[in-house]
Structure formats: structure tokens, C-alpha cells
Amino acid sequence: MHRLRTTFARLRPLTAAQTAQRLSRGLRTFQPTRCPNESVAAEPFLNGTSSNYMEEMYYTWLENPRNVHKSWDIFFRNANAGALPGAAYQSPPPLSRTSQGIASVQALAGGQVNVEKLVEDHLAVQSLIRAYQVRGHHIAKLDPLDISCVDFDDAPCAVGFQNVEFSRYKERLCKLAAGGFYGLAESDLDKVFRLPTTTFIGGNESVLPLREIIRRLEAAYCQHIGVEFMFINDVEQCQWIRQKFETPGVMQFSLEEKRTLLGRMIRSTRFEEFLQRKWSSEKRFGLEGCESLIPALKTIIDRSSQSGVESVIMGMPHRGRLNVLANVIRKELEQIFCQFDSKLEAADEGSGDVKYHLGMYHKRINRVSDRYITMSLMANPSHLEAVDPVVQGKTKAEQFYCGDTEGKRVRWSR
């Protein structure tokens, strides 16, 4: 606006009275290098009587450039870019029935069609993103041995691909969209689209080419992890899941984190291998094929302890229970092994229940947060579903006695 006021001041000629008044005060007046008449001729709409109207049009343009005529939009853009007043103004195209006027009208009509096509393409991209969020888990590569056909997808999942071959993924995307490819074509792969607020695949970027959008959606929803969450009615929960799975680089870990995860995975696998080799005929409900449960539980406990959680109460079925007791709750291995071998004497006889029904209560320092945390695994009843109210009741009791009215210090999981 300061530039426009300066333009008005330069274009408006001084009256005789103003000139005499400034000379009497000893002030120097600005003398433009060009004749005022020529400036007014170059900008016929700039004069003293139209300044208020000009200012009103400028403020309207600042709110939304579409609220003013195209000629005003061009003038304000040129003026803000630093163009001289004479060069900033461009007369609007004539609307006469001459060939030039008809061509101008056709050009404006063609521009309107292009705008509609642009809006349709952006809506198509938004629908495509939602299709991945809703149905992406159907084509995730969940079969590492490739011995079964997952849902309707016959094309193999390309893990870690960098370029999207439209001919290869067109049929795949059409099936995923369950209604066609929303009018998008191979020529649109390199077009840049603005991302909606319901996705986090852009990270710090708000616009991405369609090729990169598809690549990131494939990496988030169609790899070795399938996420089905769009049935949740809570918008905040859906946004939290999107952010955790869609943000670029979310699966990248530091060297120390990789070593920690590897160590925990080795502990879980070696425990199962030892039990299998030592007591192969004993019933133990092993964790083979799901050893990643141990690193996952320990990571959850680490993050919970960092957030101020002081107690974690868990309930779980038979499968993997001994591994959780040994590597998560940290029950003494001597006590676990004594329950396998009748020749060994257990230090604590307990209730006499089978080994894969027993629970454990342990308080120790978490090495990540350097805080004390209490971990409990509830004993398993014969009917597994009966453990749920037991876990909830113990959690409520501990929250009551430690004064945790908001449920931020004591958590439970099932």
C-alpha cells in the first residue's frame, strides 16, 4: 500500500496554493522527471477523486484476488513487483465482435475449462490418497513366502521402488480405487498437486508430483505392514495413525536404535531356541514367527516411561507368555526353568498352576528414561476372556491409590 500511495503522490500535480505554501516554509518539492500530464495519460484511472476507490479495490484484492477484475489483478501484481506505474497498467481485452474480441473471449473460456480440469485433478488425487488409506492393507505384502494370493491383487508388490511405471500400476490403482483411476492419466504423473490436510506423506512439503505421491503411499501402506484404521470414528486417532505411518523417514533409525532392536530380537529368538532344544516335548506355547513382539513391547514401555508412566499392567494369552515373562517382565530364568524340569526345585512354589498361566510383578529402572517403572503381567485364568476385567480392576486400583485421576501414570494393555 505504501508503494501505491507513493505512486499517487507522484502522479497527482501540486496546486498553486500548495506550491506557494511549501516554498514559504523553505521545503524542497519533489520534481518528477516526466510530465504529470504524461503520467496521467499513461494511468487514466489515477487521480485525486479515485484514490479512495483505488484503495478500496486494493484491500479487496489483498483479501482475494478473484474479487476484483482481471485487469486490476494484473495491475496490483505488477505494482507489488516493482513495476513503474505506466508499465503496471494493462488495458482489459475488448469485448467487441471483432476477431480479436472473439479470440479473447475464447481464451477466457479456455482458461475456465483449465481451471475446472485442475480442480478435478486435485479432487482425484485426494480420492486416490483416501483409497490407499482405506484399502491399502489389502495389497500389502504380508506373505513373505509368496505362497498365497492376497485379496484381489495379482501384481507383486515392488518393495523399495523409486519410479512408478504407470503401465504396471494402472490396473493395480484402478482396483485399489474401486471405481477407476479418477480420470488421471499417464501424462499426469509429473504434474504437481497440492496435498490435502488428511495426509502426512509430504512431510515439510505441501505439494508433490503425482509420481512421488503414489510412491510414498505405496511405501506407507503396501509394504510389509498393513494398516486398517479408517473405520475408527475418532478423527484425532486417525490423524495420529496417519502421522505415524505416512511421515517420510518414520522407519529410519539411528545406529544405536538399530543395535538395541537387534539385541532385543536376539534375546527373544535365543530364548525360544533354548526351550525347544532343551525341552522339546514340553508344552510351552512358543513365540516362533512373532518374535518382534518383544522389541515392540519394550519400545512401548520405553516411550511410556519417558512420558511419565510409572506402572504398566498387561494381560495376554498363552502364546509367547514365557518369552514376555523372561525378556519384558524380567522374571528370573531359574524360576522359569524349574517349572520345566521336575528334578529342579523352585525357590517359590507359588499356586501350583501351570507355567504358562502364572504372572509376575517386577519394579526396575528403565535404562532409556532412567526412571523406576513397575511392570505386571496378570495370571491367566482358564477362560482367557476373564483376564480383561482383572487387568482393568488392578489398573483402576493402582490409579486410585497413587492419585492418578487422569490416567497418565498407570496404563494397561491387553
Image (cartoon, rainbow, N blue to C red):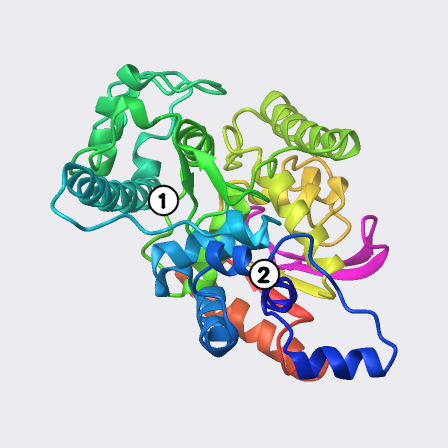
Instruction: Give left or right: position of 12 versus 215.
Output: right
Please tell me whether mark 2 sits on a helix, a strand or a loop. helix
| Residue at the spot 60% in from the left edge and 56% down from the top edge | 35
Give the residue type at disc 2: Pro
In depth, the one of 212 and 278 nearer the eye is 212
Residue 203 on image: x %, y %: 57, 43
Magenta-highlighted residues: 349-377
- Within the magenta stretch, is there residue 363? yes
| Residue at the spot 60% in from the left edge and 35% down from the top edge | 251
- In the rendered view, tell whether residue 324 sits above or below residue 38: above
In depth, the one of 307 and 94 nearer the eye is 94
Please tell me whether mark 1 sits on a helix, a strand or a loop. helix
Residue 188 on image: x %, y %: 32, 28
Which numbered marker is on residue 133? 1
Mark 1 vs mark 2: give the one in front: 2
- In the rendered view, tell whether residue 77 sits above or below residue 165: below
Residue 228 on image: x %, y %: 36, 46
> Circle 2 is placed at which residue position?
36
Mark 1, Cα crowd under 10 Å, few <14 / some 14-19 / many 20+, is many
Residue 138 on image: x %, y %: 30, 35
Instruction: Give left or right: position of 59 versus 123.
Output: right
Which numbered marker is on residue 276? none
| Residue at the spot 75% in from the left edge and 64% down from the top edge | 30
